[in-house]
Structures are given as structure tokens and as C-alpha cells.
Amino acid sequence: MEAVAKLRNVPTSPRKMRLVANLVRGQKVTRALGLLKFEANSGAPKIEKLLLSALANWQQKNEDERIEDANLYIKEIFVDEGRMLKRLRPAPQGRGHRIRKRSNHVTLIIDSKVEPLGSKAAAKQAAETKGTEATAEAKPKAARRSSKKSTETKAEATA
């Protein structure tokens, strides 16, 4: 079951925030938290807080499950442009240059990654059955060889 968290009107340019979002996209939640804790970009603490909020939302939906056992990962994270504040900065000869103060909206979706039923166990079982099949195939060949030898010895005995 997935959980969503949104962060609105963050006073950082979307371009700077996307750099941090690209770091954690598709990562496991524990790894993403470790990356964000030591990331130098200004958007990292905000996305870290957003990820913790998404974890809390997931926990609220799934009260009977533990976060450690859920195998959570960041399914989707995207950064959209928010509203833009427009200001004027004085420029030479009585002119004014327009300053655009950008903001962004971040949406984060986490989900539990469901591994195929016992993927490691299934691979192990397949290897074991393959080994037993190989021994089963070897027995008929050995039986064929022994039957050929017995027919050869019978032919030699009659000749």
C-alpha cells in the first residue's frame, strides 16, 4: 500500500530541488534517509522531512505492519513549479530589472516493494530440483550403457 506526502510553496527554485529529488528517486527509504542526511544541497533537509512525513502517513494506513519489514522504497518523486513572486530591482538610468523569486511543490510517493514469493527460496529450490533432475537423467544413460555392454558380451559369447 502506498503513501503520499506533499510539500507546497517551498521557496527554492524547482531546478535546485530536482537535483536532490533525482538522488533519491527509486531508492529504498533507509538508503534515501542516509543520503539526504549528509547531502549539502539546500533542498535535502526539506525532502528528508517530507520523506519522514510520508513514512508517518504509511504507518497510519498500515498500523499492523512494521516499517522495517515492509521493504519500502520511493516509488515516485517529482518537483513542480510553484507560484512565482515578481519583484523589481533598481537598474541604471532609472530602469528596473525584474527579479523572479521561484518556488516549487514536491510530491513524494512511497510503496512497499513486494518480492516474488520467496525469490531466493524459489531460486534455491530450482537449483535443487535441477540437481535431482540431472541425477535422474544420468541413471537412464548409465542403464543404457550397461545394457549395451551386456548385449556386446552376449554377442561375443555366441561368436
Image (cartoon, rainbow, N blue to C red):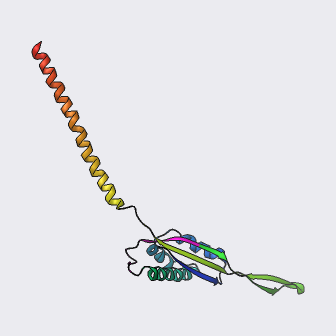
Counting from the top left corner in percent of width and height, residue 140 is at 22, 35
Q: Is residue 14 left or right of residue 136?
A: right
Location of residue 54 with respect to 133 vertically, above or below: below
Please state the extent of the stretch shown in magenta in the rendering. 63-77
Q: Is residue 116 magenta?
A: no
Tell me where residue 134 appears, x and y as whole percent: 26, 42
Position of 118 relative to 108 (above/below) = above
View extreme (right): residue: 93
Left or right side of 77 for 11: right
The residue drawn where x is 51% and y is 83% is 53
Using the rendered view, name the quadrant where residue 62 is placed: bottom left
Main secondary structure of the magenta stretch: loop
Residue 77, quarter of picture: bottom right
**What residue sits 47% from the left and 83% below the top?**
56
Q: Considering the image in quadrants, where does the C terminus appear?
A: top left
The quadrant where residue 148 appears: top left
Q: Residue at x 63, y 76 (%)?
A: 16
> How many marks overall?
0
Counting from the top left corner in percent of width and height, residue 100 is at 75, 81
User: Is 74 within the magenta?
Assistant: yes
